[in-house]
Amino acid sequence: MYDSWRSRMEMYMLNRQHGSTEEGVTRLKKYSELSAAEAIQADCDVKATNI
């Protein structure tokens, strides 16, 4: 399924960034699970992408 080096690295980086997997699938954190600093960063990221 993930035969190229690039796709393996992308999956690795996603897993490292979000930290948790369920049945081999990366599970993103819910907004309510974020710490205060992460929530502020998420808000800033959303504003930056909506410009």
Image (cartoon, rainbow, N blue to C red):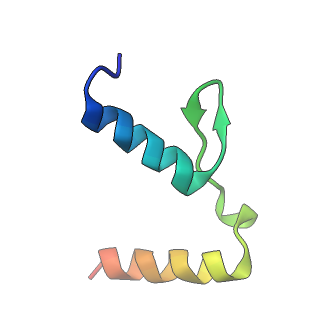
Q: Residue at x 66, y 44 (%)?
A: 20
Spot occupied by residue 39 in the image (x, y as percentages of width and height):
63, 76
Examine the rendered structure and indicate whether residue 27 appears above or below residue 49: above
Q: Residue at x 39, y 82 (%)?
A: 47
Examine the rendered structure and indicate whether residue 15 appears above or below residue 24: below
Examine the rendered structure and indicate whether residue 12 appears above or below residue 43: above
50 to the left or right of 24:
left
Q: Residue at x 31, y 76 (%)?
A: 50
Examine the rendered structure and indicate whether residue 14 appears above or below residue 34: above
Spot occupied by residue 5 in the image (x, y as percentages of width and height):
28, 32
42 to the left or right of 35:
left
Number of labels in the image equals 0
Quarter of the figure with residue 2: top left
- Is residue 33 or residue 14 the one in the foreground? 14
Quarter of the figure with residue 36: bottom right
Q: Residue at x 35, y 16 (%)?
A: 1
